[in-house]
Image (cartoon, grey):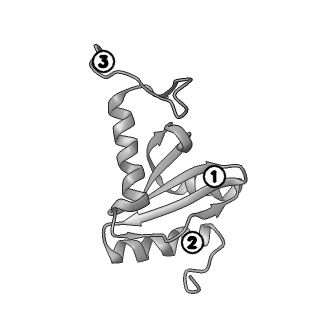
């Protein structure tokens, strides 16, 4: 804690500690995005959606990357801006990636659904 922006370490079994973030500021920012997308914004996906590697790469190429988190279970989580008030998390999974997104407004969420769901081969009209 004697550094201006110290690294962050975590332990889940009270045994081994592992580096989870190069700096406290980056760790807090990424945790903020994760909380916003998972439960903080009013309009959000109800479930985690699945993306295979090709779909995940397509997402990476289409949206503005805003942060990467290396925190515990969400090692390698990536956060993207979909539109002016909608954000998405791409979470690595054994079968590809899990996708969740959320928005500050219903209009923003509807717009996000219309661009994200087709990338996952999901028809927005059937959702």
Q: Where is residue 69 in the image (x, y as percent from the top left)?
A: 47, 40
Residue 31, above or below 5: below
| Residue 82 in view, yes or no | no
Which of the numbered marks, if any, corresponds to residue 1? Answer: 3
| Residue at the disc numbered 1 | 57
Q: Are marks 2 and 3 in contact (CB under 8 Å)?
A: no
Q: Position of residue 100 (x, y in %)?
A: 51, 61
Tag 3's secondary structure? loop
Taking the spot 53% from the left edge, 57% from the top edge, the residue there is 62
| Name of the residue lying farthest toward the bottom | 125
| Name of the residue lying farthest toward the right | 95
- The answer for how far apart the CA atoms under marks 1 and 2 are is 14 Å
- Image-based side of 114 in relation to 93, left or right: left
Residue 52 quadrant: bottom right
The nearer-to-camera label among 3 and 1 is 3
* Nearer to me, 107 or 95: 95
| Residue 90 in view, yes or no | yes
Which of the numbered marks, if any, corresponds to residue 117? Answer: 2
Taking the spot 39% from the left edge, 61% from the top edge, the residue there is 39
Tag 1's secondary structure? helix
Quadrant where the C terminus lies? bottom right
């Amino acid at each position: 804690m004697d550094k201006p922006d110290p690294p962050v370490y975590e332990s889940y079994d009270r045994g081994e500690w592992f580096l989870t973030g190069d700096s406290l500021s980056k760790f807090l920012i990424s945790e903020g995005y994760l909380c916003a997308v998972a439960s903080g914004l009013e309009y959000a996906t109800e479930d985690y959606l699945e993306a295979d590697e090709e779909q995940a790469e397509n997402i990476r190429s289409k949206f503005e990357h805003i942060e990467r988190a290396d925190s515990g279970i969400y090692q390698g989580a990536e956060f993207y801006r979909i539109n002016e008030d909608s954000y998405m998390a791409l979470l690595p999974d054994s079968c590809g990636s899990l996708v969740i997104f959320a928005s500050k407004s219903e209009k923003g969420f509807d717009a996000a659904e219309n661009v994200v769901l087709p990338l996952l081969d999901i028809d927005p009209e059937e959702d």
